[in-house]
């Protein structure tokens, strides 16, 4: 590659019904100018800056907190049994304890803690109790999307593994919209997540909205063609002009895309929810684990290509009674979460918690394997993993199980258990917004910023 040859950061390979964004390459920035953006909120990004990414991953029904929470705080702590699958990444995340969502409690509205847990999780607001007149608050991810979403092809990406319903009542008089969404564009408009990996893939790479584009995608699907087949000539031309490092990086990226396409075909279509809310490995080629990993892969690809910098992922909806027979738990998750302190139920709940954390470890592996500048995609991300309920038996919204992974482009020090007195979860969101370049003094029920993460 000629030293003075440079391509724009926002370079796409295009074909009929296809648009493939490229990952960060050395050819996209002047030599020696690639660095993480550690500027303060609102500061303009310099040429060659690596953007920060922000994601929220939601698990339902609370946890076995005795098996989740480490005994010590600070850096000198041991991972709890539930968090043990993250041992390889202990230096890449913080465990945050003592965070609460007071607006998820009843506050005179009676039952409905599962609906309030998810509706409050990213909004910090108490949702209106109604089956039709929904009213929550704009979520933190959409505050960020409104400010910086115009810098990427997609302002944000919403994902879920649960096929839910948006109308009617699902929890003690609360609208179903509360339980199947954590992202809210406005106080009355939820951002419905993509359920099928194929649909999410098409959002990232489908390209074009014309009838010709639609027919091209349908033809490609019919003949099981890769989206890369449509842009292969452009890809070959580009690779002849790249240096050795960039060619290797591009090959790895294309391999990842083909792998995701193949696994989407293998996984089949997610089954519909059954009346009691139970979902599992019920039919055909579908498995919950494959779907979950595919969603993580798609989120990683969306960040790697800078197609979006903001994403949310509902692993399963709160109050859902999905069984986990593939790990030896045949009972429904919601049923087990009401454990009544019975040892057998608590043990089964810990197995589910551990499995969720293991899948999160897969996502961290993926982000850490993608190199950016002098670090990795994980280094330039802020990933919140947790729940809107701590103890499912008590429907508690105090001391929420929360992990913050990534270094936020050098603005976060990981590797610690940070233990707070009762502190609004919204304080964490203020700090994350500021790191994304979105100036925020307050959000939801915040009382300030949670700068202990710095």
Image (tube, rainbow, N blue to C red):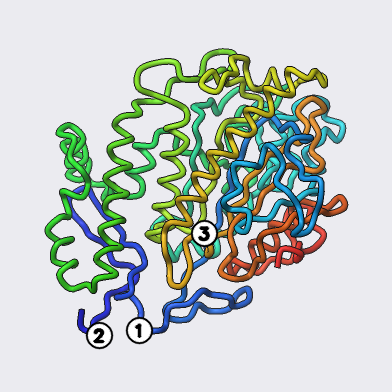
Reading the image, the residue beneath label 2 is 3
Q: Quadrant of residue 452?
A: bottom right
Look at the numbered discs 2 and 3 and tell me whether their residues touch, using CB distance below 8 Å: no
Q: Residue at x 42, y 64 (%)?
A: 371
Residue 158 shows in this picture: yes
Residue for badge 3: 378
* Camera-nearest residue between 133 and 48: 48
How many badges with numbers are in the image?
A: 3
Asked if residue 151 lies left or right of residue 38, the reply is left
Is 377 rendered above or below residue 291? below
Labels 1 and 2 touching (C-beta < 8 A): yes
- Near mark 2 (Cα within 10 A), the count class, few <14, some 14-19 or many ≥20, is few
On the image, which quarter does residue 328 sit in? top right
Q: Give the residue number, with chain letter if any, for mark 1.
A: 31
Q: CA distance from mark 2 to mark 3?
A: 29 Å
> First in sequence: mark 2 or mark 3?
2
Return the x and y of residue 292 as percentages of the image width and height.
47, 35
Q: Quadrant of the N terminus?
A: bottom left
Residue 428 shown left or right of residue 405 in the figure? right
Sequence-first tag of 1 and 3: 1
Vertical placement of 140 versus 358: above or below?
below
């Amino acid at each position: 590659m000629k030293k003075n040859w440079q391509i724009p950061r926002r370079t796409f390979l295009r074909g009929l019904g296809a648009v493939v964004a490229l990952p960060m390459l050395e050819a996209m920035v002047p030599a020696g100018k690639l660095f993480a953006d550690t500027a303060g909120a609102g500061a303009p990004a310099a040429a060659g800056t690596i953007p920060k990414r922000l994601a929220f991953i939601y698990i339902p029904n609370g946890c076995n907190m005795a098996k989740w929470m480490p005994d010590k705080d600070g850096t000198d702590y041991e991972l709890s049994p539930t968090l043990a699958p993250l041992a390889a990444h202990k230096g890449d995340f913080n465990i945050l304890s003592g965070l609460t969502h007071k607006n998820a409690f009843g506050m005179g509205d009676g039952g409905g803690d599962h609906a309030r847990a998810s509706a409050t999780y990213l909004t910090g607001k108490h949702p209106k109790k109604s089956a039709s007149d929904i009213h929550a608050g704009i979520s933190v991810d959409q505050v960020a999307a409104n400010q910086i979403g115009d810098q990427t092809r997609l302002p944000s990406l919403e994902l879920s593994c649960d096929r839910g319903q948006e109308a009617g009542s699902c929890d003690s008089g609360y609208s179903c919209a509360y339980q199947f969404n954590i992202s809210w564009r406005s106080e009355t408009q939820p951002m419905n997540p993509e359920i099928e990996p194929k649909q999410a893939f098409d959002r990232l790479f489908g390209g074009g909205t014309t009838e010709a584009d639609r027919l091209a995608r349908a033809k490609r699907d019919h003949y099981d063609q890769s989206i890369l087949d449509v842009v292969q000539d452009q890809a070959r031309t580009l690779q002849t002009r790249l240096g050795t490092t960039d060619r290797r990086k591009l090959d790895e990226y294309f391999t990842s895309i083909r792998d995701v396409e193949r696994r989407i075909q293998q996984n089949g279509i997610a089954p519909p929810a059954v009346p009691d809310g139970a979902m599992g490995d019920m039919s055909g080629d579908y498995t919950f684990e494959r779907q979950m990993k595919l969603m993580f892969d798609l989120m990683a690809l969306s960040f790697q290509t800078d197609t979006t910098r903001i994403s949310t992922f509902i692993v399963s909806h709160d109050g859902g009674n999905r069984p986990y027979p593939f790990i030896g738990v045949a009972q429904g998750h919601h049923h087990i979460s009401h454990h009544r302190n019975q040892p057998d139920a608590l043990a089964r709940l810990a197995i589910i918690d551990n499995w969720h954390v293991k899948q999160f470890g897969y996502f961290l592996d993926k982000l850490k394997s993608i190199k950016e500048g002098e670090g990795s995609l994980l280094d330039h991300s802020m990933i919140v993993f947790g729940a809107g309920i701590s103890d499912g038996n008590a429907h508690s919204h105090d001391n929420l199980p929360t992990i913050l992974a990534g270094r936020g482009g050098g603005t976060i020090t990981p590797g610690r258990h940070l233990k707070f007195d009762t502190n609004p979860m919204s304080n964490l969101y203020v700090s994350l917004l500021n790191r994304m370049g979105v100036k925020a003094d307050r959000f939801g029920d915040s009382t300030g910023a949670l700068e202990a993460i710095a």
